[in-house]
Image: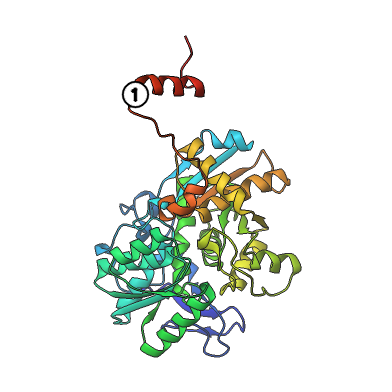
Amino acid sequence: MNKAFKGYRCTVCQTFYTPQRDLMACPSCGGILEIEYDYDLLKETIDIDYFKNHPDRSMFRYLPLISVHEPVHKNMLKVGWTPLYRSINLKDQLGLKELHIKDEGLNPSGSLKDRASAIAVIKAKEGKHDVISCSSTGNAASSLAAQAARAGLKTVIFVPKRAPVGKVNQLMVYGARVIRVDGDYKDAYDLSKRAIETYGWYNRNAAINPHLVEGKKTVAYEIIEQLGFHPTDWVAVSVGDGCTLAGIYKGFYDFKKLNLIDRIPRLLAVQSEGCAPLYEAARLQKPPRPTEEDTLADSIAVGIPRNPIKALSAVIESKGQWITVTDEDILKAMRRLGETEGIFGEPAATATLAGIGKALEQGIIKPDETVTYVMTGNGLKDPKNAAKAVDEPVLLKPNFNELDKYLKDKGDIPDV
């Protein structure tokens, strides 16, 4: 039993509930729940020396700060402790003093969503569930299917018709029962919600399940540690339903409450112009309205964000900013990231880089400030859109003279 896990607080009506029941939503008003901890109790054991001496190089080095009770993580796929690269070339192109890239594409299924899915599997086993289900544009689903397969659990996954082939292939290989819904993400979510309630499956939908933010927040913990407990001025991430953004803020908040850092970085929240309900909500200072999902960045194509309160609050509390980028910006950033740093990001991940560039142009981020870029997912998940970011490779006959002429015409070798 995690004694520091105090319970749940509703983000709407503020009602508190003890952890004796595993809740998904507020029983009083149906609002999204926030996990609360006893920070005074945690301070008795959690300090900088705790991390210096901890042998676990995965997200589970932070187990006392996660709302799970069963120590079943030892047999799971390794999630977390992904590299934080100090940019060599890209920072100069952008005109930034310092840029760090947190490569979440190196998690087991290729995205940050593995952090949340690992927690979902543990909570499902705690509750003696045999089946876990969710709706997803791909990453949440593929991460869940991978983690569940390792744990011996079954998964039923609902994806919109447009889900990228790379992610659907992952699901099938991991043995998931995949339901392609002839509609958008909203339709897939609604059908999954009905099925989960009807059949009693464990609910991995991140915007509903309050424990999943507790997995996502570990990426912030790692950034703090990898930067020597001195985080950058800004941390940038792309946003769909808002759960990852909320998790990153929660991670910085936790370490601030534990006196491990002296400030919370400003958060740059990036959405696609084709699907930006949270950006518009922040701009108009009104609740988000349903929006079309018109973007190639499928992982952030969420027309009805289910976690708006936590997401909007994260930007406000961190004194951050919202920004939007076009699909053209996203594809340019995909190529730019690969050419300058050798990292292949999917569209939702490179949307963040496009957002950093735009924020610099608009003076939101200053050239003398430091930035951490959370690169959320691997580009191999969406080969169709990756092909749009690059040119077709040349096709030559197996003739050296033809090769020699081509290379000289391109300037790859000197004409001597």
Q: Nearer the viewer, residue 307 or 314?
A: 307
* Quadrant of the rendered image containing residue 146: bottom left
Residue type, mark 1 in image: Asn
> Is the image coloured rainbow, by chain, by secondary structure, or in one colour?
rainbow
Q: Is residue 52 left or right of residue 244?
A: left
Residue 259 spot, x, y in % from top left: 53, 57
Give the left or right position of residue 206, taking residue 172 as reference: right
Residue placed at 45% from the left, 24% from the top? 406
- The answer to whether residue 229 shows anywhere in this view is no
What is the x, y in percent for residue 132? 35, 77
Q: Quadrant of residue 118?
A: bottom left
Q: Position of residue 7 (x, y in %)?
A: 47, 79
Q: Nearer the viewer, residue 228 or 142?
A: 142
Relative side of 181 to 172, left or right: right
Which residue is identified by label 1? 399
Residue at x-position 57% and y-position 82% = 31
Q: Position of residue 14 (x, y in %)?
A: 60, 82
Q: Residue furthest top?
A: 416
Q: Is residue 31 above or below residue 265?
A: below
Q: Furthest-right residue in view? A: 284
Secondary structure beneath disc 1? loop
Q: Quadrant of the N terminus?
A: bottom left
Q: Which residue lies at the image location 42% right of the left edge and 59% below the top edge?
A: 46
Q: Is residue 252 visible?
A: yes
Q: Nearer the viewer, residue 213 or 173?
A: 173
Looking at the rendered structure, the number of numbered marks drawn on it comes to 1
Crowding at dot 1, Cα within 10 Å, few <14 / some 14-19 / many 20+, comes out as: few
